[in-house]
Image (cartoon, coloured by chain):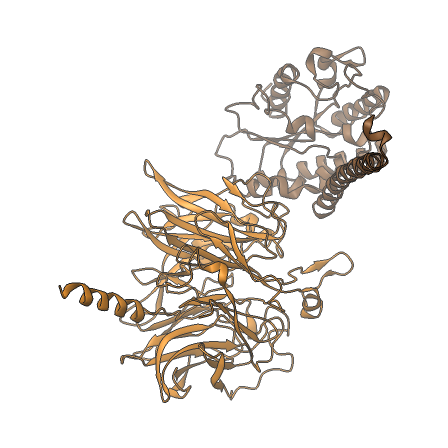
Chain colours: A brown, B orange
Amino acid sequence: MVLAKNPVGRSVLVLLIAACIAVAQTADAGVRTQALERIVGAQRQLLLDWAGLTRYGSEDAEIRPPAPGEDRAVFLGDDITENWGTGDAKFFPGKPYFNRGIGRQTTAQMLVRFRQDVIGLKPKVVVILAGTNDLASLMGPVTQGMMAENVMSMTELAKVNGIRVVLASVTPVCDCFKNQTALRPQGKIIGLNGWIKDYAAGSGSVYLDYYSALAEGRNLKRELTGDGLHPNDAGYGVMAPLAEQAIARALGKR
Amino acid sequence: MRILPVTGAIALGCTLGWGADWLTDGGNSLRTAWQKDEKILSTSSVKDMKLLWKLKLDNEPRQMHSLFPPLIVERVNTASGPKQIAIDAGVSDNIYAIDVETGTLLWKKHFVSTWTPPANGGRGGGVLCPGGLTATPVVGPAGTAGKYTLYAASWDGMLHQLNVADGEDVAPPSKFMPPNGKPYALNLYNNVIYTHTAQGCGGNPNIVYAYDLATSKVGTWGPSGGGMWGRTGPAISSTGVMYTGTGDGRWDPENGIYGNGIIGVKQNPETKSLDLVDYYGPSNAEWLVKRDLDMQVTPVIFNYKGKELMADAGKECRMYLMDTESIGGDDHRTPLYRSPLLCNEDVNFASAGIWGSLASWEDAKGTRWVLTPIWGPKHSKFKAPVEYGVVKDGAIVAFKVEEKGGKFTLTPAWISRDMNRAEPPVIANGVVFAYGNGEDTDQAYADVGLADTADRRIPGSTHAVLYALDALTGKELWSSGDQIKSWNHWSGLSLANGRVYIATFDSNLYCFGIKK
């Protein structure tokens, strides 16, 4: 009050306010710049390595050929595969299974790295869990037809290399925590899974039905997820025995 | 009563007499880049470092090469008295001798070749094969105090032996290797000169060469794939084994192919031929060759707790620690220690990773240090207890060598400030000297794709900046700022007697030190 009545004080006050605004604007600009730098950095990385070949490339080179009698399997997928084993639920301890999931990937990206991350490891079985990010068009617009061609190409590549194929259903989503169904409409998931099941049957692949075990109605069961999209440890606990059974079927052991 | 003055006189005499030399690239045949005899530059005095002189030489750059790191001979008997001389080699087959006290040219030798170079200069006239003299020479004592011989390999593949005092031939030029190859810094050990070649320049295979000075016989050995292009040439152990990394090539030792690994060869004392005595292949060698991540760094060899160890690295940006008794263990694929990635998260084959050579020193407490330059951003998961801000373009990373329960490791100690393409450091009296070379290292561009040409890279290059860092903490003590006006490619630092030398693309030799 005293400052405001005094002309000098008023000037000081005005200057202080202006300085605060400038600092706030500068800070705001700084935050915006950092956010933009992050986006540019991510886009640059995507441009340099769109298929994610650098994620597992070095590790792949260090893996020795399978021992005689080893039932090696590779799990190829996106974030749902990549996250498997990062919590308390471990990724098939003691099993010769390799996790080759990369977050946010679509079937087109998986197709590009199929030779390096799957064929190169000489597995007997590949478990492909893909499609949820195609549905969400994370890498640009994708139709079911485009996605289907990528899955078919991966299946054919596997077959000519003597690798048996397990095609997993796309997992369900729910709006339990935030809106997930806008990007991944539940009806589209069901339709896509129908195609995967049919194609698996027609191509001599094994269909792995995660969807039915994880869903209640059309929704991912709330207790099996932390965000309505990705399974939690309990969710992976439901998926693991199903994957084991599918691999056994592919190997002709069941 | 007379003891004190006598002791004092001896101490003074020793101080004055203990001059330092830098007779070979990397300082010694182990390539430690550690100037043990430095007395003038220190953590307290280095802040006063100034540009003492700058000398423009008439060497014509070829592609991106110009001058190599100078060699320093502290006391050479010349016709006009003893002098401290810097010998600097230029890519256009030139050797310059400079009086370091005055920064003036004493003599110049241009090798007149009997070989006619092709019109395009080298393999294809590209950056990788500039033609000309490409190996930093080496100096050896000539048997008499104050007399030294300079050994240099010219473009035509001849080995020249010159008197450091006046540049005159002390022996006729002798055949060393085929013309137009690309040898790297010469290393002199037990009267044998070692080097290796890379990039298949001149259509020549990538080979290790050893010239036996006593017999003039040349021994060779080749890894059958993978050029050897460690910046400071090979490193040589105490038992005379010559080690070097091999560049891109298949790792298939069963069939005699040793690409993307490290090899050790030794001269047969009877026949003077070279024999492979040890080798190591990284467990992910297949990935390294697929992504052009050469093992292209000169190793460094040092003693630690009674063992002779060796560290090496490559473009992938990983450090390896090895025992020279068996560098890869029984399976030739298991070093003592293999570090996580320090940089090159993007798997960039041109502008990231570890390039050049390493360095090693021991502090007063007996701690053994290994230092490496890195290019590009630091890996997001690599940390050191002491860091100096964001590393965007490169840095120096310092490790302590440690052994616990028989397991050896390189423990990160500090990461320096950002440097634009950090180059191999030199250590002297507790100070690390390093520089960002300012070179445009890109080889591929969004608009044209792969275009590794000097025409593109030279305009994109800026200028080098020399830094002095506290060797224990990595703290910046001094910087040349913008005093160095040009950049350099494939050069390096030399240091002796209070002076640090750096040459630039525009054929200037800079000498920094403390003014008397």
For the residue pair B182 and B168, the one nearer the viewer reads as B168
User: Where residue B437 sits: x, y (%)?
Assistant: 59, 62
**The image quarter in which residue A226 lies:** top right
User: Where residue B362 sits: x, y (%)?
Assistant: 36, 52
Q: Is residue B457 above or below residue A252?
A: below
Q: Is residue A213 above or below residue B117?
A: above
**How many numbered badges does the structure rendering display?**
0
User: Where residue B316 sits: x, y (%)?
Assistant: 55, 50
User: Where residue B242 sits: x, y (%)?
Assistant: 37, 62
Relative to B428, A196 lies left or right: right
Q: Residue furthest left?
A: B1
Q: Is residue B450 above or below residue A161?
A: below
For the residue pair B127 and A64, the one nearer the viewer reads as B127
Residue B334 seen in this snapshot: no
Which quadrant would the C terminus of chain B be assigned to in this image? bottom left
**The image quarter in which residue A249 lies:** top right
Residue A170 seen in this snapshot: yes
Which quadrant would the N terminus of chain B be assigned to in this image? bottom left
For the residue pair A73 and B133, the one nearer the viewer reads as B133
